[in-house]
C-alpha cells in the first residue's frame, strides 16, 4: 500500500484490564477507529464515547508477522500498561509516569537501552547500589557535579582500579581535608608544575628522610636557605653566608 487507509465506526470493545479491581472486564460505550498503515500494520484505537477522556483509552497494533502490541491507558495519565508479544525492542513514552512495586524488580535488556530526560531526574536507593559496566563508561555534566556524603555519615569511600587512571582539568582543583593525608607510591613519582610551587606549614615539623640514595636540589639562578636573620645563598658564581655568628666544628 502506498498510503494509510482509515476506517471509522463503532465496534464492540475488547476485554480490558482494570488495575483497581484486579480483573478484566468489558468496557461499554467505546468508539473505535481502525488504521491500516502503508507498512501493512493494523492499528485499532478505542476512545471514550462520552468525550471525557483526554485521549485514547486503548489501542492495539498488529503487524503482518503477527506481532501484537497493546497499550491500555487508565484515567490517570501517569499510568499505562504496555504489552508487546514480540521479544525485541519496546519503546514507551509518557508525559508523566509513576511506578511503585512492593517486590523486587528486575529488567534485562539484550540490546541497546537509551534514556533521555529533558529536565530533572532523581534516583534514590534505600540501601546498597551496584553498577557494572562491561565496556566503556562516559559521564558528561554541563553544570556543577556534586558528590556529597551526609555530614553525620561515617562511611568510607573506596576506589579500586586495576588499570590506569587519567585525569585532566582545564580549570583549578581545590582539596580540603580535616583529617590526615597519606600518600603511597609503589614506584617513582614525578610532579611537573608550570608555575610556582609552595608548601606552607603554620605549625608542626617538616621532615625529609631518604633511607638510601641521594638528595639533590638544583636551580639555575639561586638556592636560598633562611632561618631567622641568618641565611645561606647559593648563586651560580658564589656562595653567601650571612649570620651574626658562624661556628665551624662547634
Image (spheres, grey):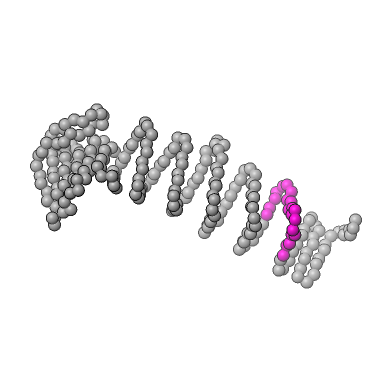
Residue at 54% x, 46% y: name it.
159
Quadrant housing the N terminus: bottom left
Residue at 64% x, 49% y: name it.
183
Q: Is 146 in the magenta?
A: no
Q: Is 205 in the magenta?
A: yes
Please name whichever residue, 139 or 210, is drawn nearer the observer in this view of the structure.
Answer: 210
Residue at 47% x, 35% y: name it.
127
| Residue 172 in which image quadrant | bottom right
Q: What is the residue that sits farthest to the top in this orientation?
A: 21
Is residue 118 visible in this depiction of the protein?
A: no
Residue at 62% x, 43% y: name it.
178
Quadrant housing the C terminus: bottom right
| Residue 100 in which image quadrant | top left
Q: Is residue 173 left or right of residue 186?
A: left
Please name whichever residue, 246 or 156, is drawn nearer the observer in this view of the structure.
Answer: 156
Q: Magenta part of the protein: which range?
A: 199-218
Is residue 132 visible in this depiction of the protein?
A: yes
Which secondary structure is most common in the magenta stretch? Answer: loop
Please name whichever residue, 46 or 200, is drawn nearer the observer in this view of the structure.
Answer: 46
Q: Position of residue 219 (x, y in %)?
A: 71, 66
Q: Position of residue 82 (x, y in %)?
A: 26, 40
Amino acid at each position: 500500500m502506498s498510503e494509510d487507509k482509515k476506517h471509522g465506526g463503532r465496534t464492540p470493545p475488547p476485554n480490558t484490564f482494570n488495575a483497581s479491581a484486579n480483573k478484566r472486564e468489558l468496557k461499554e460505550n467505546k468508539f473505535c477507529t481502525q488504521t491500516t498503515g502503508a507498512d501493512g500494520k493494523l492499528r485499532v484505537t478505542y476512545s471514550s464515547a462520552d468525550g471525557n477522556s483526554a485521549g485514547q483509552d486503548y489501542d492495539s497494533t498488529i503487524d503482518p508477522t503477527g506481532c501484537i502490541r497493546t497499550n491500555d491507558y487508565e484515567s490517570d495519565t501517569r499510568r499505562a500498561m504496555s504489552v508487546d508479544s514480540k521479544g525485541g525492542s519496546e519503546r514507551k513514552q509518557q508525559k508523566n509516569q509513576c511506578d511503585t512495586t512492593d517486590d523486587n524488580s528486575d529488567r534485562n535488556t539484550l540490546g541497546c537501552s537509551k534514556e533521555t530526560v529533558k529536565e530533572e531526574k532523581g534516583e534514590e536507593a534505600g540501601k546498597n547500589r551496584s553498577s557494572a559496566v562491561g565496556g566503556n563508561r562516559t559521564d558528561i555534566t554541563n553544570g556543577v557535579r556534586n558528590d556529597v556524603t551526609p555530614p553525620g555519615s561515617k562511611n568510607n569511600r573506596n576506589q579500586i582500579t586495576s588499570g590506569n587512571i587519567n585525569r585532566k582539568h582545564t580549570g583549578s582543583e581545590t582539596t580540603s581535608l580535616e583529617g590526615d593525608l597519606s600518600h603511597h607510591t609503589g614506584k617513582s613519582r614525578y610532579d611537573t608544575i608550570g608555575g610556582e610551587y609552595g608548601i606552607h606549614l603554620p605549625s608542626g615539623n617538616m621532615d625529609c628522610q631518604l633511607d638510601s640514595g641521594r638528595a639533590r636540589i638544583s636551580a639555575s639562578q639561586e638556592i636560598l636557605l633562611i632561618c631567622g636573620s641568618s641565611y645561606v645563598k647559593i648563586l651560580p658564581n658564589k656562595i653567601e653566608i650571612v649570620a651574626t655568628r658562624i661556628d665551624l666544628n662547634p
